[in-house]
Amino acid sequence: MVTLEFKEGFEGSFSKNNQTIAIGKDYFLPYDFTFAALGSCLYATFLDELEALNVKVYDANITVDGVKRSSVPTTLEEVTIVCKCCSKDDPNIVKEAFHLACLHCSMFQMIKHVADMFADIEVICK
């Protein structure tokens, strides 16, 4: 369970287990949370796929960005995910694991129903 609290407009917080994140125009906005959920879900799924293929990564960096539709409802029109990671294993196997993760990640698959999804991975060290 999470708790959201708002005071005087769209300034508030998101809390869980005594951890709090500020919400508002100068803080985190709703799609920031969506992108964070997508990126973390995809990374968790990626780790599962890597384990199944007996390979590992370290020092991963994932960026998630998107464009919202201008028409109502303003769902996402396009989402771009870029993963840069380090691995001592075969980069082709790491890339295969990432593409499998995109197929198996529940958040990726859910958002794919409303947006064009673009995902890429770069294995930057060995």
Image: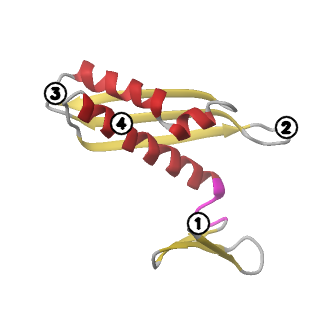
Tally of numbered tags: 4
Give the mark nearest the N terminus, 2 or 1. 1
- Measured in 3D between alpha carbons, the distance from the residue under mark 1 to the one under mark 4, in whole angstroms, is 28 Å
Along the viewing direction, whichever of 119 and 27 lies nearer the viewer: 119
Q: Which residue is mark 1?
A: 27
Residue 112 at x, y percent in the picture: 62, 30
- Quarter of the image for the N terminus: give it: bottom right
Of all residues, the one furthest to the right in this rendering is: 72
- Measured in 3D between alpha carbons, the distance from the residue under mark 2 to the one under mark 3, in whole angstroms, is 45 Å
Residue 18 at x, y percent in the picture: 46, 79
Q: Which residues are magenta?
A: 25-30
Which numbered circle lies on residue 71? 2
Q: Is residue 38 left or right of residue 60?
A: right
Residue at point 27% right, 26% down? 94
Amino acid type of disc 3? Answer: Asp
- Quarter of the image for the C terminus: give it: top left
Q: Which residue is mark 4?
A: 46
Is label 4 or label 3 in front?
4
Residue at point 63% right, 59% down? 29
